[in-house]
Amino acid sequence: MTLNVGVIGTGMIGQDHIRRITHVLSGARVAAVTDVDLDRARTVADDLPGAVVHETGQALIADAGVDAVIVTSWGPTHEEYVLAGIAAGKQVFCEKPLATTREACERIVDAEVAAGRRLVMVGFMRRYDAQYGAMKAAVTGGAIGLPLLMHAAHRNPSVPDHYTSDMIINDSTVHDIDVARWMFDDEIAAITVLKPRRSTKAREGFNDPLFVLMEMASGVLVDVEASVNAGFGYDIRGEVVCEDGTVELSESAGAIIKSAAQFAGRVPQSWPERFAPAFDTEFRAWIAAVTAGGTTGPSAWDGYAATVACDTAAAALHSGQREPVVLRERPDLYKEA
């Protein structure tokens, strides 16, 4: 069986997923596309045999020839399309964020609960990265004892001029927020955001880097250094400190070469370079699950919890205070392993 997928949003990430489904993975084809820029959607469709171009996301979701939907449009549009997918009974892969506000995420959670089954997977691809997977296996395996701390870093070489301090949290640190919840199977209880000395590479009024401290409900502390003008590359770091040992991510890409009393290795220059295999694994899992009649991976609850944590971190950034993370009660639908 070939899964017929419709893609809403044919920008950079949408086109990358279309490439992945068309040229890298098996079991699915892109049957329909749409974008707010219809000319761009038509250009993308020209390279997809038999693909239909729809004028709206709603029309694409209603298309009987579309079995499942991928939402990669602008964040504030996600709620509309995810809710429409749920109403149509179609599985939806939604790139983060699930939605941009707590209330929008709650409406999605309520709709899915009313439907009585999971229909939404949120695109937190780090859960599918081999290094993060090995780290989680070491932590949950128990051989190095109970986890106590996690140190993380998210360093971008640069960001566009429109980037803001809040976006460091919502676009970058959001991945570390999801990793923390997943790594420890725990919720975040409170967040504090500190502003270190501002990098001279950051424009006036832009707080970069940021230091985000998360308190997990279990007492584990997670700190994240978020820097978006690092210059030298796209550098992702992580280490979990346990009672009897530690586990950390290895160098991000390539081999370490030792020669002439020196050693050197490559630092990735972009997120596609660092996480391309994780994206492939993520979509392979989603296609297999949807073809079998279900879904997998990060749920709508995970998307909701991440958005609430990001909102809380933004509040902590502006208040300079420790801010509690307040979640609603988790519905039974999301309590399954």
Image: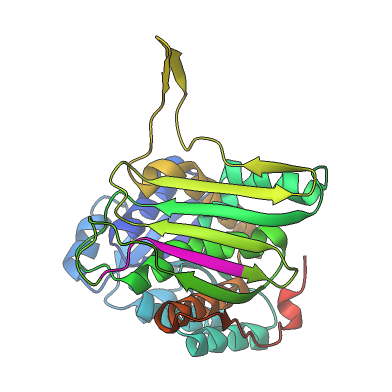
Which residue does the image show at 38% across and 41% down from the upper left? 273
Q: In this picture, is 101 found above or below 31?
A: below
Residue at far front of view: 197
How far from the left and from the top, in percent, is residue 141?
Answer: 80, 47
Q: Does the image show residue 38?
A: yes
- As rendered, which of 145 and 111 lies closer to the eye? 145
User: Residue 82, position in %: x, y?
Assistant: 48, 78
* Residue 55: x %, y % from top left: 26, 76
Name which quarter of the figure residue 109 lies in. Answer: bottom right
The stretch of residues the image draws in magenta is: 206-214
Residue 221 falls inside the magenta stretch = no
Q: Position of residue 50 (x, y in %)?
A: 33, 56
Say which of 106 and 136 sits in front: 136
**Residue at the location (66% across, 45% down)?**
135
User: Which quarter of the rendered picture does the C terminus lie within?
Assistant: bottom right
- Left or right of 217: which side holds 154? left
- In the rendered structure, the answer to whether residue 55 lies left or right of residue 283 reads left
Q: Based on the displayed image, in which of its 4 quarters is residue 216 positioned? A: bottom right
Residue sitting at x 59%, y 68%: 214
The structure residue drawn at horizontal position 30% and vertical position 78%, both measured from the top left corner, is 56
Queried whether the magenta region covers residue 210, the answer comes back as: yes
From the viewer's perspective, is residue 114 above or below residue 6?
below
Quarter of the rendering containing residue 297: bottom right
